[in-house]
Image (cartoon, rainbow, N blue to C red):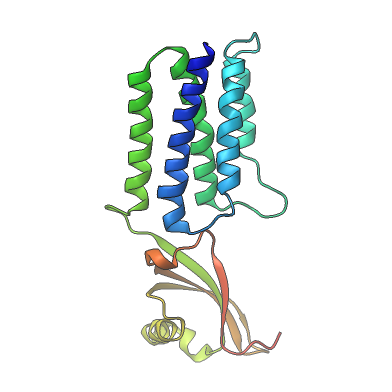
Amino acid sequence: MALTDLFLGFALNLAIAVLIVRFIYYPVNQSKNFVFTFLAFNTIIYFVMSVLSTSEIGVGVGFGLFAIFSVLRYRTNAMATREMTYLFVLIGLPVINSIMLQQGGWIGLAALNAVIVAVLFVLEREWGFRYSSSKSIRYERLELIRPENHQALLADLRARTGLPVTKVEIGSIDLINDSARVKIYFDEPRQLRRSADDVVVVGDDDD
């Protein structure tokens, strides 16, 4: 691969990665925690793939290496599913770009990148989809968890959490402390979307 093509491909790959992270991922998640990780992985994998494609190691070994990278979880904080998905996309992107660049297909390269960006954009804008979230709650009004009071339970949870609760699952019941562990499900507004489930307490906490 010519040095000029190598860096032109890198510029295109990085531009697409920044477009995905800055204008698709970040506006919805409003989190900078993984921006460094996404862009760093994307950059190093592009150059590693470019080197592997011209060496005797072969692309197959490279794919095996990136498969290991794609399932990594940092020991400090577990990555949520959404962030893991973006990481996988930004790992696969330079692999695709480096291979397409080797074949000299600039038109195909641009088309593939455009498709990836378009799909992510549509999914994040929720066109035709509805996202649900859940929260684990410690709830103290045991009289409302009875089956005949299901509607009253939903109404109380909606009023006290401010969330559009659609479903409730009753878990363990602590009769000594008059509380129960329940899990609520709700259609999450865009501005309240989080990357992982939260845990909240409704009622008094005697622990």
Q: Quadrant of residue 157?
A: bottom left
Q: Position of residue 27 (x, y in %)?
A: 42, 56
| Left or right of residue 75: residue 102 | left
Residue at the outermost top position = 56
- Say if 35 sits above or below 162 in the image: above
User: At 50% from the left edge and 31% from the top edge, which residue is drawn?
Assistant: 92
Which image quarter: residue 180? bottom right
- Image quarter in which the C terminus is found: bottom right
108 left or right, relative to 71: left
Identify the residue at horizontal 56%, vertical 42% (top origin): 38
Q: Relative to the observer, which residue lies in front, 33 or 166?
A: 33
Residue shown at the point (66%, 46%) measured from the top left? 73
Position above or below: 169 against 50: below
User: Outermost residue, front direction?
Assistant: 4
Q: Position of residue 56 (x, y in %)?
A: 65, 8
Q: Nearer the viewer, residue 34 or 163?
A: 34
Q: Decide which of 158, 183 is in the foreground and name it.
A: 158
Question: What x and y, as percent, mark residue 30?
Answer: 48, 59
Relative vertical location of residue 42 with respect to residue 156 in this rendering, above or below: above
